[in-house]
Amino acid sequence: MKLTTIILAAGKGTRMKSNLPKVLHKVCGRPMLEHVIDAARNAGSEREIVVIGSGADEVEKSITDVEFALQAEQLGTGHAVKMAKDKINDMEGTVMILCGDTPLVSADLLEKFIENHEQTKATATVLTAMMPDATGYGRIVRNQSGSVDKIVEHKDATEEELQIHEVNSGMYCFDVKALFDALEKVTNDNAQGEYYLTDVLGIIREQGLLINAFVTNAFTQILGINSRYQLATAERILRQRKNIELMDSGVTILDPDSTFIDYDVEIGRDSTILPFTYLETGTKIGENCSIGPNCRLQNTKIGNNVTMQFVYSHDAEVDDDVVIGPYVHLRPGTKINKKVKIGNFVEVKNSNIGEGSKLPHLQYIGDTDMGTNVNVGCGTVTCNYDGKKKYRTTIGDNVFVGCNTNLVAPVTVNNGAYIAAGSTINQDIPENNLAIARSRQVNKPAWKDRRQQ
Ligand code: UD1
Ligand code: CA
């Protein structure tokens, strides 16, 4: 039978004090709901039904490849599960229930949890952990023989129950039929006036059916995110996990505490990441690179043996053996080919820089196709915009661009051409020509003496 997962994500997220639905807040560069969906899938779930309500449109737009069930009014977690009933009408067997606000749960833990549920043949299994600070969580109340009696929400708990540190993770495996039968019996007679999913456990036990707790000793896996502080905590934990994973695969991270790497970033062996570096989603780095200090790379693909420091790059591509920085901005649509050198204080936008070319200091290169082994002098600017439209600059191979050149696009500088320093080039330059486009210098003899008279 196909394992189906229902993920609750309709809540208002009041405690976040945000206009963005809580489950779309990002942890390690990705909405927390997506972390949960991913963990479920990697644990063997084959179908995911996400219950949405508060901010439903936004959630539906940003999450793909799942089914949605609408909970128009948020009357509690029990009510939310009921909204998915139509979608699993005549299903039999196990359904897993997760919350969209527990992004730290791993596929590995869920896999063991599902396996435990199947093995014990329980009607319901709840995933629990001993939580150092149990504030806000539902408490697991066990009877004298140690088996689970019921779950009591923090707000409904007695003084004695509040002392319990074993908490409900909000993750469960249920026999589908027993779950929906029990949900019919849930009332909203509690401190929050909500239909609690947690009440289902007590109801199932009262029917004489087996309910079980699967206790994990990794409490960080089940942390629920209700506030911005908890969000920051989750961020720290996931980043640490990502850094450890990368280090285990052969990447040196000089100072993991000041290195921020998103969940999907890939880095090759023997690359070194220096402090104050942000590697954001879509970024891929090859082997033997040295990245940082102070690089921010967003959706940037980098080859092998690349050195970068003090660089901001987005939607760009860098080939092998390139040296970039300090103080370089690579903007979208930029492709830097092998053995190029770029830096200090250089901006490149929507351009292709050919193999072995050099942009060593103070250039703006935009909308340019540059050949191989071009040497661009300090202070060169492509004038790509006439106030209305953008135009391209084409530069051939082995071109020498003198310092402080303006290239007024559209313009083509053919192979082997030389441009004299200080030129403003607005006409094409034929192959191997020298172009001088500046007024000739005039020296006035003894001018100083005359001035002083
Ligand atoms: C819930 C559990 C609590 C558990 C904790 C674990 C209940 C009653 N309580 O409390 O025992 O320890 O999670 O993190 O289940 N949601 C809906 N519709 C609603 C209400 C909530 O879809 O009407 C969704 C939320 O979007 C959220 C999840 O259910 O993803 C949990 O809701 P939340 O309000 O965060 O519950 P907690 O108070 O954290
Ligand atoms: Ca919660």
Image: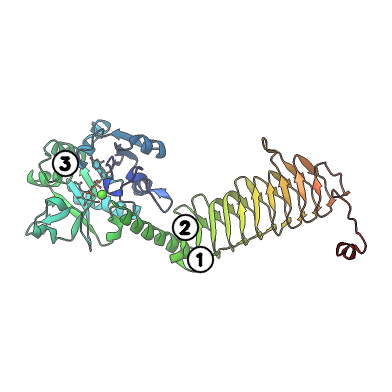
Seen from this angle, which residue lies furthest front? 453
Residue 254 higher or lower than 303, as above or below: below
Type of amino acid at the residue the image marks with label 2 = Ile
- Name the foreground residue: 239 vs 194: 194
Tell me, yes or no, if residue 373 can be seen here: no
Mark 3 vs ligand 1: CB below 8 Å: yes
Of residues 69 and 381, the one nearer the viewer is: 381
Real-space CA distance between mark 2 and mark 1, rounded to the nearest whole angstrom: 11 Å
Q: Position of residue 404 (x, y in %)?
A: 76, 54
**Going 76% across and 52% down the picture, which residue do you hit?**
372
Q: Residue at label 3?
A: 194
Question: Which residue has dot 1 on it?
Answer: 275
Q: Which residue is mark 2?
A: 261
- Quadrant of the rendering where the C terminus is positioned: bottom right
What residue appears at the point 12 percent right and 40 percent down from the top-left corner? Answer: 188
Horizontal and vertical percent position of residue 347: 65, 52
- Residue at mark 1 to residue at mark 3: CA–CA distance: 47 Å
Give the residue drawn at x 61%, y 50%: 317
From the viewer's perspective, is 334 left or right of 239? right
Asked if the residue under mark 3 is in contact with the one under mark 2, i.e. CB atoms within 8 Å, the reply is no
Image coordinates for residue 355, horizontal then vertical, percent: 72, 53
Gap between marks 2 and 3, in whole Å? 39 Å
Q: Are marks 2 and 1 in contact (CB under 8 Å)?
A: no
Q: Earlier in the sequence, mark 1 or mark 3?
A: 3
